[in-house]
């Protein structure tokens, strides 16, 4: 298993960015967020890319960006919730990092994502959208090396668990 990167996967609102930032500070590693990297490269927000070019185009950009990021090391990488849908992305993640799936109860997810209206896949009835996509992705995050339910844990507790399980707690 390759521990030179930590790759955070999980549904929208499971805490990948928050946990990733803290973990990167603890480790003295670089924090990377693939959505932000795509936005920098395309000079458009994720929502704009979905609107102008469509989801398939975004997925291509996401795979390309993920591969580029994974070619470096000593990074904590927060991926977009749908990055796991492509088999090639899952393989790259497992090859180049320690993959951690963050999960949360659906009501927790709904509460967390409700403060940010920008996610293109959650437009319309938020609760219905979350439930439908969660159902569709029921096993999508199961390939990870470890899985943590973040519903009732603090960011610090989650970071500690990851460091311990990855054998990186010093
Ligand atoms: C998506 C999740 C988003 C972003 C895009 C699509 C998904 O990232 O990549 O809106 O398919 O689950 P976050 O998981 O950071 O919200």
Image (spheres, helix red, strand yellow):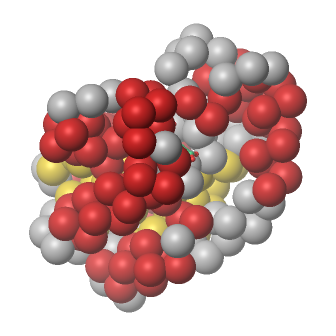
Q: Nearer the viewer, residue 68 or 32?
A: 68
Quick check: can you spot residue 159? no
Q: Residue furthest top?
A: 115
Q: Residue at x 76, y 46 (%)?
A: 133
Task: Identify the image quadrant of residue 106.
Answer: top right
Above/below status of 61 relative to 73: above
The N terminus lies in quadrant:
bottom left
Q: Residue at x 47, y 31 (%)?
A: 51
Quick check: can you spot residue 57? yes
Q: Residue furthest front?
A: 52
Could you say where residue 84 lies in the image, as x and y percent from the top left?
A: 54, 65
Q: Nearer the viewer, residue 52 or 147?
A: 52
Task: Identify the image quadrant of residue 47.
Answer: top left
Could you say where residue 160 lies in the image, as x and y percent from the top left?
A: 44, 50
Task: Identify the image quadrant of residue 18.
Answer: top left
The mark total stands at 0
Could you say where residue 127 lies in the image, as x and y percent from the top left?
A: 83, 25
Q: Nearer the viewer, residue 33 or 61?
A: 61
Q: Residue at x 32, y 56 (%)?
A: 61
Q: Residue at x 67, y 23 (%)?
A: 123
Q: From the viewer's perspective, is 50 left or right of 152?
A: left
Q: Nearer the viewer, residue 98 or 44?
A: 44
Q: From the viewer's perspective, is 111 left or right of 13?
A: right
Could you say where residue 23 lies in the image, as x and y percent from the top left?
A: 32, 46
The C terminus lies in quadrant:
bottom left
């Amino acid at each position: 298993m390759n521990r030179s990167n930590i790759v955070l996967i999980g549904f929208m609102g499971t805490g990948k960015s928050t946990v990733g930032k803290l973990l990167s500070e603890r480790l003295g590693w670089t924090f990377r967020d693939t959505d932000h990297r795509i936005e920098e490269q395309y000079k458009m927000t994720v929502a704009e890319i979905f609107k102008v070019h469509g989801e398939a185009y975004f997925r291509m950009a996401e795979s390309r960006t993920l591969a580029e990021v994974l070619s470096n090391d000593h990074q904590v990488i927060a991926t977009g919730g749908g990055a796991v849908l492509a088999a090639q992305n899952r393989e790259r993640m497992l090859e180049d990092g320690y993959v951690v799936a963050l999960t949360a109860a659906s009501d927790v997810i709904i509460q967390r994502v409700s403060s940010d209206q920008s996610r293109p896949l959650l437009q319309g009835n938020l609760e219905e959208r979350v439930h439908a996509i969660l159902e569709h992705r029921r096993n999508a995050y199961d390939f990870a090396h470890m899985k943590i339910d973040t519903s009732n844990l603090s960011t610090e507790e989650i970071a500690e668990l990851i460091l311990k399980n990855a054998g990186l707690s010093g």
